[in-house]
Image (cartoon, grey):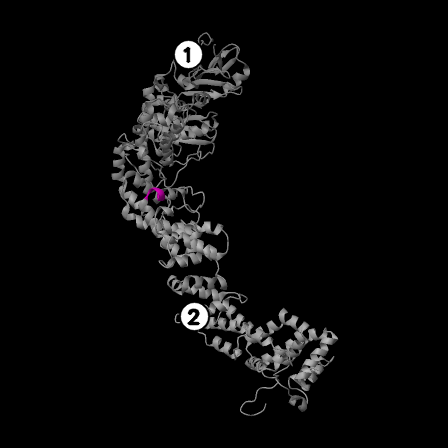
Amino acid sequence: MSLAQLHYTSAPPGPDGSGFRFTAVSPGVPQTLLREAEQLIGYEPPRDLPARPDAEQLKGFPKAFSCSELSDGGRLLSRSVYTGADYSGRWGNFHAHALHLPPGVRLPDGALPITAWESPRWADATPPDGQPRPVDRFEPSGLLRRDGLVAFARSRADRLAAFFADLRALTEETDTRQIVLVEHDSADVAQWIALACAVLPRERAHRLTFTTYTRRPQQARQQIVGALPSSEPVGHDHRFRVHDCTAGADEEPVQDAWADVCARVWAAGRPELFRDSSGELGPLAVAALVQGIGLRADGRAAAARWAAEHAFTLPPETLPVLIAALAGRSGKGPGGQSTRYSSTGQERGAQGTRYSPTGTPLDDEPAALAALSARLDGQVPTTVSAPLAARVLATAVLGRGPVPPLVAGSLTPALRAELARDLAPALRQGIADAAEPAAGRPLALLRVADLLDVDCTEALPEFAGRIARDLVSERTGEPTAEQPAAEKPAVEKPAPEESSPDNPNVPAALLDAVHGHPALRTALFGALDALAAVNPPGAAGRLAGSGLPVWLDSGFPHLRMCVQADGARRAGGDRRRRFHDVLRTAGVSPHAEPAVLRTAFLLAWPDGLPTGEEASLLLSELGSDAHRLAGTRDLLVEAALAAPADDPAVPVLAADLLRCFTTELGPAHRAPLLLLEYAGLLDADQDVEGWVEHVRRLRDGAAEPAPEPVTQRVYDAVARRLLAVPAPGSEAYAAPRPMVSESELYALARSGDPGLLAAYERVARGDRVGERLRTVPSYVAACFGDWSAYPQTHPAWEATRTTLLAKVLRPVVRVLPDEDRSAVEEALRRTGRGRLDAYRAWNRPGALGRLAGRLTGRGRREERQATWYGDVEPPGGGGRR
């Protein structure tokens, strides 16, 4: 088809007027197109060029070659040149020759608009007959030939990447700012545009709008705007990204990987590589590497990622070359530096991790190479994949990156030997690195050492100790006291390895290493066994159900018990049964190795102590010697001292401990155990005397205060013994025993001991005493006798007995049936008339105040001297009270 053409210049008067006007237009061009085109094809000469140039000087004026978008979706391709004076001799004339490309229509042969730069088809003057000649093709200018563009690109090598980065953002519409190119010659701007169109996908290059020159860049509509140094500056206008090629280049590194690869391809003189890349980074980076073009780390990473997805669709001859390039086995990398086993393989232009505009880390080459190596491992001949595997492994070891899971078949023997020689020091140092969790990276490095046959035997004991400490610690991986967090190296930790399914505290990688590395297993089990012996519950909490193969080695009884403690716990049953089940898993007798007894003890009672009965059985079953050697004697003592006051078996346990460890118990333990033993004698109604004073003597003579459960137990025993008085007038009451009880009551009253008195009141207020008071009238009489005795002996006793009379006895007496009231008075009558009279006075309505005064010594003299059996202090020194 024939494309519509337009010619525009200052012309003599004619049918369309004079001055600047369209002087030749193809038939059928609408006026709307002409009016829009007139706004795009204007030309203003540079201010710094001659105002009246001669013919030779005219050749130096810039040419405004433009491709502009029209409102109908089409394109206007135009060339405007300065022609000097017009027909009237007035200076400032120009001639514009334009071509209209309707929507969807391109130049003949699908040529890109920029290829028409300075084609012979462009006219500098209007056709003599006023009829545009048809254009069937545009012969390209010699300026845009391959060699010329390569030479130009190399001359602008330090600016290419920045320009391509802005170009990509502009054409992908992630940044709509126009690009302004400042050059001394508009032909240089045309070459920039040719470079841009070469790197862009074909369709995007066809849509690119541009102009090679304008004196007013701020009024330009095109995406790429060419300008001269004398053009109006755009300053800091936010609408533009300015690349001033007449000034110094910006030294800030470009973070766009695609732009960097494009720049390197042009600088290498291989623009044909852009044809098959479709503008994508991955295939372009692959093609560049295959052609020997050195790339930055992010470019190599992009090539590796793309190759991992398309590895088996690449030509057979391409993959080995690509792998060799990625592995750095071709000898020299960019800049002539050796790339063999580089620790990072990266060219850093800025500090820290850098990111592309799309958010992709620029320094992810190790991960990308590792992914490609894993994709190829076992799928291609080892001779092909081994160099990459070696590079990945070396980078991981030297650069502290994730260690790939290689196997022996991943490397050739020669590469394995070479890696062993080069990596041995780093492997030993990494395994010994205390800054890393031992079961993480150091363990992976130990696998590498095994793969490469690097001897790390000397590091195993310390290494196994660190693994053991990490395993039994609840804060694995956090800074230790020896190395605060601020001193830890700023190294990104790899993701934690998958743990065993039964116990997440033990990584699956560690279990694999323990199975396959006997020397490590022995060292690790020894370290874990020692830690398990120190803190069995803590070790069991971290290791139970872990699957550690303790059956593969003999010994390590503490570790065995902790690893298998979970099974004993699930077995249920009482704790003694659990204790014996755990002890059996040790595989050794506690008499041969007594320390296992303590471990089993702490595993069976991890968060408490055995009851008195359990402790007594443990002592009798295993004997005192075993507990003495195992260090569990003090645990049994603690079980006795910390037992609740209502545990009936504790006094027997205390007696057994005193008997079995007679000479070994310190004062801090002996006195409380004696108190517990004595409490048992009192509760068993043994024939002992001096209860109160004996208890106080044992308590006050102790090196340390007795535990509260111990004193409560013995105080309650004294109180129960005192409150278990026989009924007055009974045969038991007439025997010598009541005298003992009454003397003990007097000892209590005289002592004023707060603990004993509080226990006496607590027991008296209890249900047991209350039930007996309500059902046994004679017991009411006995309690009245006790609680009305020994007035003014001690203020504390005075408060206790009056409280018991008022709060315990009176509520019971008020509700007694008549026959029980009579029985109470009969029991008191048998003890003497005085006590019966006192009871009647106390029980008479309204007489409580008077009786209280009488019982406390206030009132008439004859009332104070009224005495009866049991209410006076036993005479001392032959005198009377």
- 474 or 194, which lies in front? 474
Which amino acid type is marked by label 2?
Arg
x, y (%) of residue 542? 43, 50
x, y (%) of residue 659? 43, 70
Is 516 a magenta residue? yes
Mark on residue 659?
2
| Local SS, label 2 | helix
Q: Earlier in the sequence, mark 2 or mark 1?
A: 1
Asked whether, in this view, residue 511 is left or right of residue 853, the answer is: left
Q: Quadrant of residue 881?
A: bottom right
Residue stretch rendered in magenta on the structure:
513-517
For image coordinates 44% across by 55% down, the residue present is: 580
Question: Which residue is under mark 1?
Answer: 137
Q: Nearer the viewer, mark 2 or mark 1?
A: 2
Q: Is residue 605 above or below residue 212?
A: below
The extreme front residue here reads 731
